[in-house]
């Protein structure tokens, strides 16, 4: 019954967002969210829906084959853009101007380029954004469910497990597992930052501490909102998963995901629409019990049930990858000169924003291949790129930005 209700709600949300007097299409990554939106578009369209996706050359980052399979099954008019590191390098100088603030979600690069691709064919594009926040699709959501069960294990045993993960993390940082025959997905899971984080989560002694570590250690939690309280001050949200979902919806979604989508689309005169964030869908999602969102170690359980009505299960049940970008490899390769110049700017600025000794150490370790510091370096580099751009646009006498004269107003 819940699946029927969600199917009806999503059909309505998608159908209303397909109303347009200009060409219409959709972003398709091959993941659950975008595939659901496209499936419901095609089910209600008399013509082939235009779909667009990004293809990466680097192994482990290319979701294009999954998107192509979904597109073939649904019968959409599908277009792929093969993104090279040179294309990424060419667009990076535009990022500070387009976002107009320090913004360091590296998936802004493919988002911007797929929006540019779509605008060559359509004027409105539907997106699957919001599905993770509504229906629990991030690793921290599954981890919250699993770690709640691990709390029953003795603390001493969990500390031993955490120590083992710490050893694996050190091996990953030193790239000692390079010679092992591991798949791209396994290597992605064995990143040192993921292992370090999991080790810290295992040693949490109670739910509040686990919540703080899940949310506080995540760069995704950009807004620190407190859960809404009732008149007597008692929190209305019960359960670890609900608390994390609220944090994602109040913080990460409006401060990162939707900023990324809005700037990327509007910079290309493309209108982005998000049917999964229809208020009726969000209200329905918040009424659902947690066990129809997270089940059997995976998220978006009920959304997957809806999608199985339109797409074979083999195209749905695969590890979540997201819009990841091989920034670590690019910084050692085609983006190295660009990044090195920005590190030099940090050294010479004298403004005290960065700890230059730490920046230098991270940069040397990264380019020498000793450690992957891309997670620390990318935000610093994007801040410095924005800072340089802002200084170029400032008027020295007043510090005000240059504004072009408006005539005929």
Image (cartoon, helix red, strand yellow):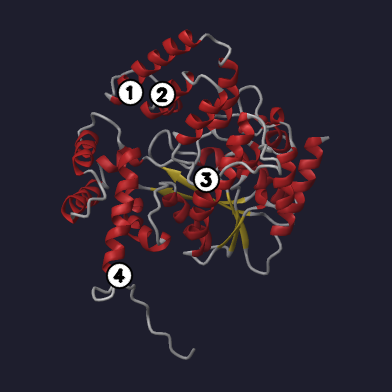
Q: Does the CB distance between marks 4 and 1 fall below 8 Å?
A: no
Q: Is residue 275 visible?
A: yes
Q: Which residue is mark 4?
A: 393
Determine contact: label 1, label 2, CB under 8 Å.
yes
Specify which label sits upstream in the sequence, 1 or 3. Answer: 1
Left or right: residue 14 compared with residue 248? right
Q: From the viewer's perspective, is the residue at label 2 or at label 3 nearer?
A: 3
Q: Secondary structure at mark 1?
A: helix
Q: Earlier in the sequence, mark 4 or mark 1?
A: 1
Residue identifier under label 3: 252
The CA span between labels 4 and 1 is: 42 Å
Real-space CA distance between mark 1 and mark 2, rounded to the nearest whole angstrom: 9 Å
Residue at 64% in and 44% down? 228
User: Tags 1 and 3 in contact by the CB under 8 Å rule?
Assistant: no
Measured Cα–Cα span from mark 1 to mark 3: 28 Å
Name the residue furthest right. Answer: 1
Q: Residues within 10 Å of mark 2 (few under 14, many from 20)?
A: many
Of mark 3 and mark 4, the one earlier in the sequence is 3
In front of the other: 87 or 381: 381
Is the residue 136 above or below the residue 120 in the image? Answer: above
Q: Residue at x 56, y 41 (%)?
A: 247
The residue pinned by badge 2 equals: 195
Q: Quadrant of residue 397?
A: bottom left
Q: From the top left corner, tell me how far across and down residue 373 is, in percent.
A: 30, 35
Helix, strand or loop for disc 4: helix
Q: Earlier in the sequence, mark 1 or mark 2?
A: 1
Q: In this figure, which residue is indicated by the disc labeled 1?
A: 172
């Amino acid at each position: 019954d819940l699946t029927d209700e969600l199917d009806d709600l999503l059909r309505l949300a998608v159908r209303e967002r397909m109303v347009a007097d200009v060409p219409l299409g959709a972003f398709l990554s091959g993941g659950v969210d975008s595939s659901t939106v496209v499936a419901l578009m095609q089910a209600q369209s008399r013509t082939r829906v235009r779909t667009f996706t990004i293809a990466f050359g680097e192994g482990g980052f290319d979701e294009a084959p999954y998107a192509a399979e979904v597109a073939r099954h649904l019968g959409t008019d599908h277009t792929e853009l093969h993104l090279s590191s040179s294309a990424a390098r060419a667009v990076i100088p535009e990022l500070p101007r387009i976002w107009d603030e320090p913004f360091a979600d590296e998936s802004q690069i493919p988002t911007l380029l797929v929006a540019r691709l779509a605008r060559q064919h359509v004027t409105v594009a539907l997106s699957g954004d919001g599905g993770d926040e509504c229906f629990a699709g991030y690793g921290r959501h599954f981890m919250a469910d699993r770690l709640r069960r691990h709390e029953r294990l003795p603390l001493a045993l969990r500390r031993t497990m955490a120590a083992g993960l710490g050893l694996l993390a050190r091996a990953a940082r030193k790239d000692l597992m390079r010679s092992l025959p591991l798949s791209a997905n396994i290597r992605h899971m064995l990143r040192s930052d993921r292992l370090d984080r999991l080790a810290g989560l295992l040693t949490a002694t109670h739910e509040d501490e686990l919540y703080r570590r899940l949310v506080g250690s995540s760069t995704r939690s950009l807004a620190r909102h407190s859960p809404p309280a009732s008149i007597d001050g008692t929190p209305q949200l019960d359960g670890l998963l609900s608390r994390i979902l609220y944090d994602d919806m109040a913080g990460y979604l409006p401060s990162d995901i939707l900023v990324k989508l809005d700037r990327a689309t509007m910079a290309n005169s493309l209108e982005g629409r998000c049917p999964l964030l229809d208020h009726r869908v969000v209200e329905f999602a918040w009424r659902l019990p947690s066990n129809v969102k997270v089940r059997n170690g995976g998220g978006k359980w009920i959304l997957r049930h809806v999608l199985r009505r339109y797409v074979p299960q083999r195209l749905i049940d695969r590890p979540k990858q997201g819009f990841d970008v091989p920034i670590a490899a690019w910084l050692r390769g085609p983006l190295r000169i660009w990044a090195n110049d920005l590190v030099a700017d940090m050294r010479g600025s004298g403004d005290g924003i960065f700890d230059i000794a730490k920046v230098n150490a991270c940069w040397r370790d990264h380019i020498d291949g000793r450690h992957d510091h891309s997670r620390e370096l990318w935000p610093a580099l994007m801040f410095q790129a924005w800072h340089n751009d802002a200084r170029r646009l400032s008027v020295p006498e007043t510090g005000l930005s240059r504004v072009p004269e408006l005539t005929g107003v």
